[in-house]
Image (cartoon, rainbow, N blue to C red):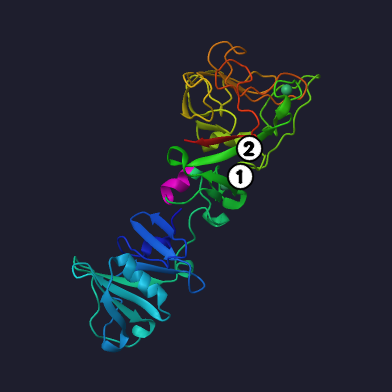
Amino acid sequence: MVSSTLRSVEGEGSHLCAKPAYLLTIIHLLNWQWVGTKGKNKGVFFKVSEGVWALRNGNILWTGHASSILACSQLCARKDNCGGGSFAKERRACSLFSEEVQAGISAASLKKDEWSIPLEEVNFFEKIAPMPGTTQSSAVSSCQALRSQAMWSPSGVYWIDPDGGSQDNAFKAYCEMETDEGGWTLVWSYTFTNYLNFKSNLNAVTPKPNWLILSKSYQIESRISTTPPLSQTDYNAMNFSRWHQLGQQVLIKSNINNWLICDPGTGSFVDWKDGSVNCNIIKHVTNTCNETNAPSKFTKMGVNGPMFCSTGVFDSTYYYFDGDKNNHWPTHDPCGKNEGNHLKTVDYPHGNIYIRK
Ligand SMILES: [Ca+2]
Ligand SMILES: [Ca+2]
């Protein structure tokens, strides 16, 4: 959601600057580019604006050369009472003005043209709506929506509101903004109940989501979670009923098996439907069976958990999310043979499921 405050500010591409020691916050919204630096308590941001700078000699703090508009605004950010400046591209001339420039001054004002770019310092946090996803009221519908609204947002925890409408039921979720251009909402982080005896019936993924699986009397289910995971090792699962609201494309990451991106075919993980899927291996975590193709089928099994396989269910399994501590084992086989070919002796063995449209 873009606030009216933001829309009302005019300018095309503004720029700024940073003290080198501080991390830049870079925000792209519509045609906007903001670059800010943490300094002066709340942050220093600049926008390109016209007509705000009345010029007279007393207002000029400094003039000189700067290599770029970024460098010019950076110089301003370093000066205590600098309120803005102007950068002339041709001559690489930078002029900085004091903050006491506005009141009662009627001398010439600056215009943006092909030679000169006026900069106005603004306090971002007071004048501009919060960055998308950083507050409950600025919740985005998914991490993919965040990517399109604020494309340089780094991976991390953001507020999302997958069902739209009121943001009263928005919640925090982890966004992965790197793999295959990012936009992934983390819905499940799991580990194993018995990694060291991987092929034992005691081993299962834990926790498991609240997907609809008919329990049998002999089953001993691993913990069921409906709490959105906030990191790749925060072992929890978002309520399964929300998964389809985030999209259809699934990213499966693990540190003991290869990573997959799977699009639905006749089958779909998030729609809990058996059938074909179009999976690609996007990262080889192990060198074992490098020539093996990605799995091509999804089946929910109906008993212990869903799996990705290629042909027969129990002879070509690549991933099996077995959540029963009394039967079967949670296959993570890069050879797609339902065997124990996963990486061994990995610290914190785990897997993660992400979704986007
Ligand atoms: Ca809502
Ligand atoms: Ca088991």
Q: Residue at x 35, y 70 (%)?
A: 73
Chief SS of the magenta region:
helix
The magenta segment is: 144-151
Q: Is residue 242 above or below residue 274?
A: below
Residue 146 belongs to magenta span: yes
Tell me where residue 254 appears, x and y as whole percent. 58, 32
The 10 Å Cα crowd at callout 2, few under 14, some 14 to 19, many 20 or more, is many
Residue 189: numbered disc? 2
Label 2 is placed on what type of residue? Ser
Q: Is residue 249 above or below residue 313?
A: below
| Identity of the residue furthest to the right in this view | 217
Relative to the observer, which residue lies in front, 214 or 319?
319
Label 1 is placed on what type of residue? Ser
Q: Secondary structure at mark 1?
A: loop
Tell me where residue 174 appears, x and y as whole percent. 57, 45
Q: Residue at x 56, y 29 (%)?
A: 270
Judging by the rendered image, the residue that carries numbered circle 1 is 231
Mark 1 and mark 2 in contact (Cβ < 8 Å)?
Answer: yes
Tell me where residue 57 appears, x and y as whole percent. 26, 88
